[in-house]
Image (cartoon, coloured by chain):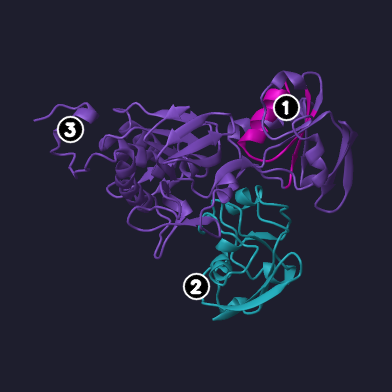
Amino acid sequence: MTKIIYVEHNGNSHTVDVENGLSVMEGAVQNNIPGIDGDCGGGMSCATCHVYVKEEWFDKLEKKLDGEEDMLDQAYEPKKNSRLSCQLTVSDELEGLIVNMPEKQV
Amino acid sequence: MIKTDALIIGAGPTGLFTAHQLKIIGLNCEIVDNLDKAGGQCIELYPDKPIYDIPAIPECTGEELTKNLLDQLKPFNISFHLGERVDELKKNESNWEVKTNKGKAFLTPNVIIAGGVGSFEPRKFSLKECEKFEDKTIFYSIKNKKIFEGKTVSIFGGGDSALDWAVELAKNSKVNLIHRRDEFRGAQATLDKVHELKKSGKIELFTKYQLKTVKGNGNLESIDIEHENKEIKKLETDYVLGFFGLIMKLGPIANWGLNLNKKTVDVDTEKFETNQKGIYAIGDICNYPGKLKLILSGFHEGALAARACFKLARPNEKYRFEFTTSSKKIKERLGVKGD
């Protein structure tokens, strides 16, 4: 289990323990955290699990695969520190990861 | 009003195979889809990506799967109503009265929702002010390219639509192409063309910029774009085009009195019927214990929903289960010779 902190756009913060191996998106959906949809189920085929990751964490994350940046082009208000949370696998190294959500996903 | 035994909402793989199942058991059906082509997510989200878990097909792309499903429907005469969204669903005695946004109306005892995650709609600019210019000087699709002749057009986006239109409109307009990063994801040939047109001054390219503000009274006068490093540039422009792909919205389905669970519809696992008699939900949009969002699950759900439709469409007949390998009636429907 790894602690992940999900922060909604309005500042509401949810700290949950997510099983290692799940994606950050799955951790949100399984714990009913509002603000992350994951419409396509984690296939990098939509952009509804879009999150912002603070700089200090950005380098610790898995590298973007081809295609993630393409999907992010279609996200709501993408920024430099945007990621698709379905592409972030939870592991011990991510203990305490904070992800911030955009105002909306679609 | 069009009368039919069953109306299918959604022409994705689940909707297409369900049409096949309805026709096999002797029911007629009509299909409505908001997209202008059949295939749903397969054709819109991953036409070129291989799928590996369709039973008996080791590997095929979204486009191939769609083509095969349409081929399988060839023996039947099925009316597709593409580019139309179902907006209204009203009870009319033992039937449902269904209306689309284009004013088409259907009367049917059975409505099968095979709507994926909802209907595809273009993603729009997040700036609120853009709304008042929408369909006047800000567009997300192009219906009449003549209006841009001799004007300045600012195109946002980095995919094929943005690149294709930049090249096309550069023939008769001054074109600004703006993208949030410096890599494009369109076809290389188009991208080469864009760079050529940039050299000859027909296209101005702004990368790592996004739309910051729009200015104008009635008509658009100028826009400000902001660089990643916060630098702001003002562009005089007559028109703005945004090509950010499509998003899926549940849309009007949310207003039909169905039991919703987040963005999905609760169904039973015998008929895949919702809480409303004669309305079924199958494929990605339905929810039941153990639901898997796989194409093959959609096929199974559609086959069962089709049998349930028979009872309401032919209340005085008895449905008899038959195999395609041996049934004379089914072979007639398929237009193949019996043994």
In-image side of B204 versus B43 (left or right):
right
Q: Which chain is cyan?
A: A
**Magenta highlight on residue B86:** no
Determine the image quadrant of residue B262: bottom right
Q: Residue at 67% of width from left, 38% of height from top?
A: B243
Q: Position of residue B46 (x, y in %)?
A: 49, 44
Q: Nearer the viewer, residue B336 or B241?
A: B336
Q: Which chain is purple?
A: B
Marks 2/1 same chain:
no
- Quadrant location, the C terminus of chain B: top left
B278, above or below B139, in the image: below
Which of the chains bears the disc numbered 3?
B
Q: Nearer the viewer, residue B198 or B264?
A: B264
Q: What distance separates the C-alpha of mark 1 from that of mark 3?
A: 61 Å
Residue A51 makes an appearance in the image: yes
Q: On the image, numbered disc 3 is attached to which residue?
A: B329
Q: Earlier in the sequence, mark 1 or mark 3?
A: 1
Which of the chains bears the disc numbered 1?
B
Which region shows up in magenta?
B153-180
Q: How many marks?
A: 3
Q: On the image, numbered disc 1 is attached to which residue?
A: B197
Which of the chains bears the disc numbered 2?
A
Q: Residue at 56% of width from left, 56% of height from top?
A: A65
- Which kind of residue does numbered mark 1 sit on? Leu
Task: Please tell me whether mark 3 sits on a helix, a strand or a loop.
Answer: helix
- Which kind of residue does numbered mark 3 sit on? Lys
Foreground label between 2 and 3: 3
Q: Which mark is residue A21?
A: 2
- Which kind of residue does numbered mark 2 sit on? Gly
Q: Nearer the viewer, residue B189 or A84?
A: A84
**How many neighbours does mark 1 have within 10 angstroms: few (below 14), some (14-19), or many (20 or more)?**
some
